[in-house]
């Protein structure tokens, strides 16, 4: 298995291009199942999770042409997805277990074909992560749901019917699945307490381009009037706010200065405000964001994860890595997922001082971290170890790099171009 070696202590200076958002691209790709015409997605990131979903969609009958990069556009690639005919409405265990977001084929398949059989998902080892909200929502839309031998069997032979769905907790995936299903349901659907994440809005905008009738995009109350059919469209994936935030932390922990080209300030405002409180300067410019910590010590700040527009859970581990070297203490509270502190023991092995009490972690800043061999069991935890390694004295070896490849495109190249001493050690 590949590993990443980092020799820490160099301030990052330079420019990094931010790619298309993984968490926007995945639901957008599944939206191709809703129409027999071609959905063209541009600015798609090159990531292992995207490839995993491509394999799943191909077995459902989606034909895919990867058309290279957009003209005049270096970043991302362009993919045509055409689901002329659905070849199979079963999403098998072997493909679904690799990535939890595979559950997003459920809504589109039931809406278009009247039935679907999707394996219960696996994915990141963060908490129990149920899918009950997806299923209850589909039942509200008139589908019958049965769980049989590890599979969700959903059927609505006469089609779905619009309904009011009130989410008891905010769920990004359930909002996306039901939004897609509702576009082809008969009548009107209202999603109440819907997720407001930018990735949900990106999906809704793409569905509108495909002919869907949606109001309240970007709010917690989304109204969908079902249409008979959707058509093809061309849609550009939004920039990745979590990739952006991760490089903000990397620049901040090393005392560097980086321009993040293509980043969207509006989507990282909560993170920027917290970082400003910690002594990091963040400024938006036309087409990107600049981050700088030229002088001065980082200060500990308390953070609580929340649904958008609050501080994202997907930035919690990287923020904790940053706070390990701040002056004073920082209380980091995780409210979205249980068991999302797997990076804590690894950061402690690098010299961090962190105590976990239930869903909060008390981080007391230390003056130095020391490199160590480390590994993590999920994507964002792994990248937090890279962030820590960039500032640690000596050598850090991050094992299980496949987690990083799920969500970060050219991570080592992007950091090395800004002066980091980082390389991938390829397994024989
Ligand atoms: C998405 C993101 C993930 C991010 C998360 C929260 C993708 C591909 N993944 O995951 O990176 O960390 O949003 O911002 O976009 N819940 C239930 N029942 C359900 C569904 C969710 O109880 O049926 C709970 C979850 O256990 C969790 C909370 O709701 O406690 C939020 O989860 P959700 O927003 O659904 O996360 P995902 O869509 O899986």
Image: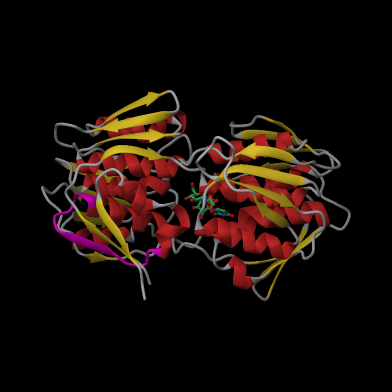
Residue 131 makes an appearance in the image: no
Apparent side of residue 309 relative to residue 328 in the rendered image (left or right): right
In this picture, which residue range is highlighted in magenta? 390-401
Residue 133 makes an appearance in the image: yes
**Residue at 57%, 59% in the rendered image:** 51
Q: Is residue 228 above or below residue 146?
A: above
Q: Residue 402 in the image: x percent, y percent?
A: 42, 64
Q: How is the image coloured?
A: secondary structure
Image quarter in which the C terminus is found: bottom left
Q: Residue 171 in the image: x percent, y percent?
A: 56, 47
Quarter-of-image position of residue 373: bottom left
Q: Is residue 79 above or below residue 126?
A: above
Apparent side of residue 259 relative to residue 242 in the rendered image (left or right): left
The residue positioned farthest toward the left in the image shown:
367
Badge count: 0
Q: Residue 96 in the image: x percent, y percent?
A: 60, 66
> Closest to the observer: 324 or 427?
427
The residue positioned farthest toward the front in the image shown:
72
Q: Residue 128 in the image: x percent, y percent?
A: 49, 62
> Closest to the observer: 257 or 276?
257
> Closest to the observer: 225 or 74?
74
Is 383 colored magenta in this rendering?
A: no
Image quarter in which the N terminus is found: bottom left
Q: Is residue 224 above or below residue 117?
A: above
Apparent side of residue 397 relative to residue 369 in the rendered image (left or right): right
The residue positioned farthest toward the top in the image shown:
286
Is 391 colored magenta in this rendering?
A: yes
**Residue at 80%, 44% in the rendered image:** 184
**Residue at 14%, 55% in the rendered image:** 393
> Closest to the observer: 385 or 395?
395
């Amino acid at each position: 298995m590949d590993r990443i070696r980092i020799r820490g202590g160099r301030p990052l200076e330079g420019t990094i291009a931010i790619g298309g958002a993984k968490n926007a691209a995945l639901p957008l790709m599944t939206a191709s199942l809703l129409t027999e015409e071609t959905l063209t997605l541009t600015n798609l990131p090159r990531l292992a999770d995207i490839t995993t979903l491509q394999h799943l969609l191909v077995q459902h009958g989606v034909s895919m042409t990867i058309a290279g990069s957009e003209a005049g556009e270096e970043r991302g690639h362009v993919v045509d997805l055409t689901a002329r005919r659905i070849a199979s409405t079963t999403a098998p265990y072997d493909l679904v277990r690799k990535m939890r977001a595979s559950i997003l084929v459920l809504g589109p398949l039931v809406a278009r074909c009247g039935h679907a059989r999707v394996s219960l998902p696996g994915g990141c080892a963060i908490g129990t992560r149920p899918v009950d909200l997806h299923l209850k929502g589909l039942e509200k839309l008139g589908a019958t749901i049965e769980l049989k031998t590890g599979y969700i069997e959903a059927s609505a032979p006469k089609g779905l019917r619009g309904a009011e769905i009130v989410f008891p907790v905010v769920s990004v995936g359930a909002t996306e699945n039901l939004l897609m299903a509702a576009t082809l349901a008969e009548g009107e659907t209202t999603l109440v307490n819907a997720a407001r994440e930018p990735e949900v809005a990106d999906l809704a905008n793409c569905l509108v381009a495909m002919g869907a009738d949606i109001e309240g995009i970007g709010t917690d109350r989304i109204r969908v009037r079902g249409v008979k059919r959707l058509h093809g469209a061309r849609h550009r994936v939004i920039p990745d706010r979590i990739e952006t935030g991760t490089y903000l932390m990397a620049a901040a922990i090393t005392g560097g200065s980086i321009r993040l080209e293509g980043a969207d300030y509006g989507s990282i405002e909560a993170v920027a405000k917290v970082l400003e409180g910690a002594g990091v300067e963040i400024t938006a410019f036309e087409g990107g964001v600049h981050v700088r910590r030229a002088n001065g010590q980082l200060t500990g700040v308390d953070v609580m994860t929340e649904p958008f527009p609050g501080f994202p859970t997907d930035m919690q581990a990287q923020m904790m890595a940053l706070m390990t070297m701040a002056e004073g203490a920082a209380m980091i509270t995780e409210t979205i997922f249980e068991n999302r502190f797997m990076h804590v023991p690894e950061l402690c092995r690098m010299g961090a001082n962190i105590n976990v009490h239930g869903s909060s972690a008390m981080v007391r800043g230390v003056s130095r971290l020391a490199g160590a061999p480390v590994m993590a069991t999920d994507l964002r935890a792994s990248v937090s170890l890279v962030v820590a390694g960039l500032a640690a004295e000596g050598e850090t070896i991050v094992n299980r790099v496949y987690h990083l490849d799920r969500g970060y495109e050219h991570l080592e190249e992007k950091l090395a171009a800004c002066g980091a001493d980082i390389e991938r050690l390829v397994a024989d």
